[in-house]
Image (cartoon, rainbow, N blue to C red):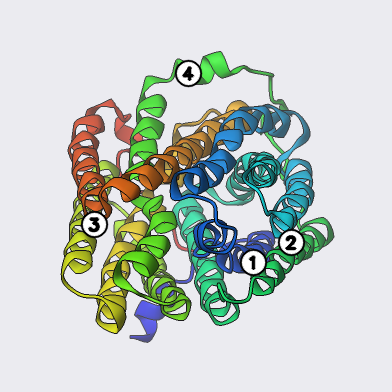
Amino acid sequence: MIRAVRSLDPRLPRAIYTLQLGGLVSAFGNGMLIPFLFIYLHNVRGIGLGVAGLIVGANAVVSVVAGPVAGSLVDRYGGRNVLGLALIVLTVGYGSFALVHEPWQGFVAAVVTGVGNGFFWPAQSTLLAGLSPPDRRHATFAMQRVMMNLGIGVGALVGGLIASTDHPRTFTALFLLDAATFLVYLGVLLGAVPEPRRREGGEPLRAGSYIEVLRHRAFVAVVGLNALFIFAGMSGFELLPVFAKNEVSVNEGAIGAIFFVNTVVIVLAQLPIAKLSEGHRRMRVLSVLGVLWAACWVAVSIVGGTVDGRTAAVLLAIVMGAFGIGECLHGAVQAPLVTDLAEPRLLGRYMALSALSWQLGFALGPAVGGFLLSVSPLGTWLVWAALCALGAALAIRLERAIPSGIQRTPVAQPA
């Protein structure tokens, strides 16, 4: 057992652990908000479900525009500098949600936040990839998933204890606390994380363009598949809280607990699953997660149509625990595969378009899902399930397009 535990040690450079610690703090702040932003806009500020979905989706829409700009800036100025700028913008963006009373104000806050998010993910991912040894990148991104989900899960639990629709000021406190966490991350970044050197044959890397990246068909197919999984899979997390509260009478505290269960599963399972993925075909792993997520969304629909209250909360927590296993499979494959497909001189652009697939999914998911929930709360989850199953089939078909040398997750070499 001791050997098994030791085998899970990713043995990563200190700078990566430091960067992950800053990410943990900011994820904690976001975790306090993610389950409750839809509730805040709809139940506290009285904004309709459809418009609230558009506000939440606007964040991701702006990220779609900002992300490619960030990729070019990262390739030119480095991930560390762009990440620092992103953290400042996120501080302003999330803090401004506390001032929202009308829909237009919500859109303004979402636009600012979207710029910050659009810059954040390409910069952080490029920085992590540059600081990580090639054979341990899957462990680096697995640890990123652990830290992000640990922060979000604990934050959701704390947010559930603070937030109350009967007391709007509790949501104001959440937004201000979230803004403060980005400043903490900024201090960690500037104080202890270096900018990795990027060289090609001893010379500075040549400039490039997005046209070169878009000509890489296998990469484009991978990020397209990822957009589908985010749209029909992970974006459901932004819909589940309002569904749970309004359709099956689950209170805010229980919603926070549901997210926390999902987090515990990811924290405990992500590194072991990343280790188990070594030597296995990456696209087969993505196919398994598509099937698993489809089953989870079918289960949510069944729960919503049969029980409510505490029983519904317990069952939804179990479903979200199972969903977390799929997230671990995704974390072991997606970002490392993108890094292995990328040319080093264009890494920032590759990471930007990879982040774009997330942003598209999160932009369309809440926007479409908000209207679907208003029409058919139970049917929404069946639509998501069908799309996840489609993604599973596409993953198998896509495997032939992946270069043979990177079809499998590499086995980490002994230190």
**C-beta proximity under 8 Å, tags 1 and 2:** yes
Cα distance between the residues tagged 4 and 2: 35 Å
- Residue at the disc numbered 4: 214
Sequence-earlier tag: 4 or 3? 4
Q: Residues within 10 Å of mark 2 (few under 14, many from 20)?
A: many
Total marks in image: 4
Helix, strand or loop at label 1? It is helix
- Of labels 1 and 3, earlier in sequence is 1
Give the amino acid at mark 2.
Ala
Secondary structure, mark 3, is: helix
Q: Position of residue 314 (x, y in %)?
A: 28, 80
Q: Is residue 190 visible?
A: yes
Which residue: 47% across, 75% down? 252
Residue at image point 32% right, 74% down: 317
Q: Nearer the viewer, residue 391 or 271?
A: 391
From the image, tell me which residue sits under label 1: 29
Q: CA distance from mark 4 to mark 3?
A: 33 Å
Q: Looking at the image, tell me whether mark 4 or mark 2 is earlier in sequence order.
A: 2
Q: Nearer the viewer, mark 4 or mark 3?
A: 3
Q: Which residue is mark 3?
A: 297
Report the residue at 24% width, 39% height from top.
Answer: 391
Real-space Cα separation, disc 1 to disc 2, in angstroms: 7 Å
Instruction: Give the mark nearest the N terminus, 4 or 1.
Output: 1
**Tag 1: Cα neighbours inside 10 Å, few (<14), some, or many (≥20)?**
many
Q: Which mark is drawn over residue 179?
A: 2
Mark 3 or mark 2: whose residue is earlier in sequence: 2
- How packed mark 4 is, by other alpha carbons closer than 10 Å (few <14, some 14-19, many 20 or more), is some
- In the rendered structure, which amino acid carries the disc numbered 1? Gly
Label located before the other in sequence (1 or 2): 1
